[in-house]
Image (cartoon, rainbow, N blue to C red):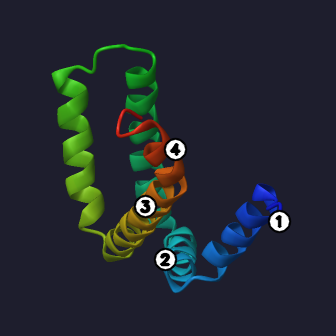
Amino acid sequence: MSVNLYDAAYALEKAIRQSDEYKQLQQMYHEVNADPTAKRMFDQFRQIQMNLQQKQMMGQEISEQEVQQAQSTVAVVQQNEKIARLMQAEQRMSMIIGELNQLIMKPLEELYGNNI
């Protein structure tokens, strides 16, 4: 019996979209976007986060000033209850995606050993 991996992937995508965790993340995201102050704060936070990730991927060093700016922005952003709930929901969803990734990679890990 042949299994179409893409069909399984689309089924997984559908399951993720129907999960309580995704629905909660979606609700928290909409709440932040509906609040102009929270949205502006969150957008600024995401921009800083993306800039740092981009620098990392390009092999550029992140300055101490940039690290301090990111840390202070996180501290301010987390004081906003809506953003804090969104970040918690993002973290739960990220953990689930990580666990799913481990399951997906398990056949290759078993085949090649733990060298992957």
Instruction: Kindly identify the amino acid type of the residue bearing the numbered disc 4.
Output: Leu
Categorize mark 3 by other alpha carbons within 10 Å: few (<14), some (14-19), many (20+).
few
Residue at the image point whose x is 57% and y is 75% from the top: 26
> Which of label 2 and label 3 is nearer to you?
3
On the image, which quarter does residue 88 sit in?
A: bottom left
The residues bearing labels 3 and 4 have C-alpha atoms spaced at a distance of: 22 Å
Residue 57's label in the rendered image is none
Residue 28's label in the rendered image is 2
- Dot 2: element: helix
Query: N-terminal of the two: label 1 or label 4?
Result: 1
- Dot 3: element: helix
On the image, which quarter does residue 85 sit in?
A: bottom left
The residues bearing labels 1 and 4 have C-alpha atoms spaced at a distance of: 20 Å
> Which of label 1 and label 3 is nearer to you?
1
- Dot 4: element: helix
> Which of label 1 and label 2 is nearer to you?
1
The residues bearing labels 1 and 2 have C-alpha atoms spaced at a distance of: 42 Å
Q: Which residue is mark 3?
A: 94
> Which of label 1 and label 4 is nearer to you?
1
Q: Which residue is mark 4?
A: 108
The residues bearing labels 1 and 3 have C-alpha atoms spaced at a distance of: 33 Å
Q: Which residue is mark 1?
A: 1
Callouts 2 and 3 close, C-beta under 8 Å: no
Tell me the quarter of the image containing the C terminus. Answer: top left
Residue at the image point whose x is 38% and y is 14% from the top: 59
Categorize mark 4 by other alpha carbons within 10 Å: few (<14), some (14-19), many (20+).
few
